Amino acid sequence: MMKKALAVVLLMLVAFTVVSCSNKKVAATVNGEPIYMEEVDKQLEQLKQQPQMQQMFEGQDGDKYIKQFQTEILDELIDQKLLIQEAKKQKIKVTEKEINENIEQIKGQFGSEQEFATMLQQANMTMDELKTNLENQLLMQKMVEKITKGIEVKDKETEDYYNKNTAEFKDPEKVKIKWIVLSEEKKAKEVLDELKGGADFAEVAKKNSTDATTKDKGGELGSVSASELPQEVADIAFKIELNQLSDVIKMSQGFAIIMVEEKQPERQKTYEESKEEIKNKLLSEKQRKVYEDWLAKTKKKAKIEKNI
């Protein structure tokens, strides 16, 4: 399910739906080029399909949120249109090979060609539309890379940031933990009795656990922080004695039995350990600032007309 969900997101995030009919309602024009209302509405519909968004749109303020998101989607489409126009003006090209490589990456999220075709259909997108959309995405990516080319972060900048923000660079307290996850409390209690009777934890986990990720590893989760565990499990894991069986823990989804093998205290990461992370953070901030400045200047010179 996770792979399919990821692939759907990849399809949904691809902008610039192809609109073939010239008589469609125009939401905006950017330097004479239209953005059709159908493009806006299609992305809005994709948002509405996301479970976490449905309640927002269906509530009493649904109409207000529809207008808000229409405006935000249109603004994003205008920004993208400006990027593509500038990329074409500067004769930036995207090859067929690059497009096909991206399609193969998306296909790789599915178990078969048929699953990919089905998901493409559910996204209401043809293969030609996907190729066009990917070409536009790659054009925008190349244009942004050109705008931000040559930006660097010096060692002194990373050192200064680390010294002023050392609290950001701490490894949180962790536990090396193994668990057995079960769907029914009765079964969980039976398994706990079996473990208390001397049964091997790993063998019992392989036989009974419903957690596919850890089952075949004997329930081994590895070293994890509290934020990486269900809250109910974290509350117990950082208090329990080493190599002691927990009682049955009721989680929001199912039940768990845990055993903590090792506890690792919070640790301050060194500058050398943090340097690359800081560099990437500062580089990203600089690139975003340069891009936003470029976009603001480009908008000032552009002829943009909105109809919604």
Image (spheres, helix red, strand yellow):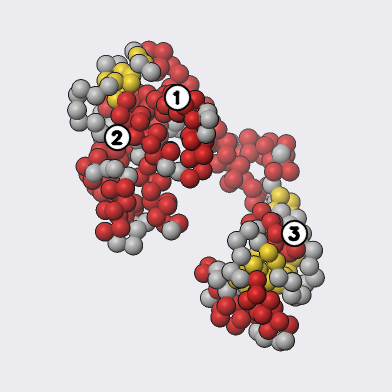
**Gap between marks 2 and 1 measured at Cα:** 19 Å
What is the secondary structure assignment of the residue under circle 3? Answer: helix
Distance from disc 3 to disc 1, alpha carbons, whole Å, reads: 42 Å
Q: The residue under label 2 is which amino acid type?
A: Thr
Q: Amino acid at mark 3?
A: Asp
On the rendered image, what quadrant is the C terminus found in?
A: top left
Image quarter of residue 39:
top left
Cα separation, mark 3 vs mark 2, equals: 47 Å
The quadrant holding residue 110 is bottom left
* Residue denoted by label 1: 67
Check disc 3: other Cα within 10 Å, few if <14, some if 14-19, many if 20+: few
Q: Quadrant of residue 194?
A: bottom right
189, above or below 33, in the image: below
* Furthest-bottom residue in this view: 198
Q: Where residue 69 sits in the image (x, y, percent)?
A: 45, 28
> Residue at 34% across / 34% down in the picture?
42
Residue 24 x/y as whole percent: 24, 24
Above or below residue 249? Residue 73 is above
Check disc 3 and report the residue beneath it: 235
Q: Which residue is mark 2?
A: 17
Residue beneath the point at 39% across and 55% down: 4
The answer to whether the residue labelled 3 contacts the one labelled 2, judged by CB atoms less than 8 Å apart, is no
